[in-house]
Amino acid sequence: MPQTRLLLKIAQTWDGQAIEPDHAITLVLEVDGDELQVEVDAPLHGDPPPEAPPGPTDQLWNHEVVELFIAGQDGAYTEIELGPHGHHLVLQLRSVRVPVATMLPIRYRTELHGDRWSGQATIPLQLLPAGPHRINATAIHGAGPDRAYLSMVPLPGRAPDFHQPDRFVVQASLI
């Protein structure tokens, strides 16, 4: 199978407002055999980490996190959440907000670099829905009125809602 490599950049809020260039987040996706490699480079906002030890962490979206959504053609999608302190959450969803599997195991490691962090995740392709795929990348950080919601693809609505697979625009065949 030929390798697939995608570069994704989050440089705006969920509703399409530009953010400071040094707050942009990049993700590199690359298929390697039967695995998807995901590399994250993101600013470190200093939010407190989850109280759980690094690894699969429920409700990680309540903390500083970068998220990758990969939708298939049948309404199913996989949500991959990656935090700066080694926490992650992978969910398979049958349709919008209808999970069929959560806390799925992946390999994940992170490094803190001053005011930025990087992460490398390895996800088995079997955790992704059948392609072709539509993709969006998002991020959340901060607390209270300073909570920020970012999205590679601007999303409609009165409040941030990342679970809009029909709006994901990056098209790829990862499997």
Image: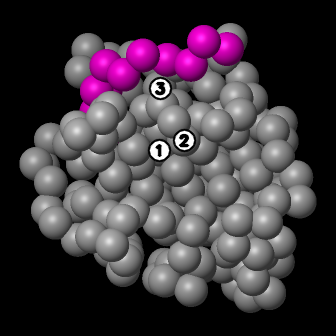
Labels 2 and 1: the sequence-earlier one: 2
Say which quarter of the image contains residue 23: top left
What quarter of the picture does the C terminus occupy? bottom right
- Please name the residue that numbered disc 3 is placed on: 84
Number of the label disc, if any, that sits on residue 104: none
Labels 3 and 2: the sequence-earlier one: 2
Residue at image location 56% in from the left, 56% down from the top? 68
Magenta span has 46? yes
Number of the label disc, if any, that sits on residue 66: 1
Residue at image location 59% in from the left, 63% down from the top? 69
Relative to 95, is 60 on the left or the right?
left
**Which residues are the magenta region?**
42-52
Q: How many marks?
A: 3
Image location (x, y in percent) of residue 132 = 70, 84
- Please name the residue that numbered disc 2 is placed on: 61
Q: Is residue 77 above or below residue 144?
A: below
Q: Is residue 36 above or below residue 66?
A: below
**Spatial CA span between label 2 and label 1:** 9 Å
> Element under label 3?
loop
Mark 2 Cα-neighbour bin, 10 Å: few <14, some 14–19, many ≥20: some
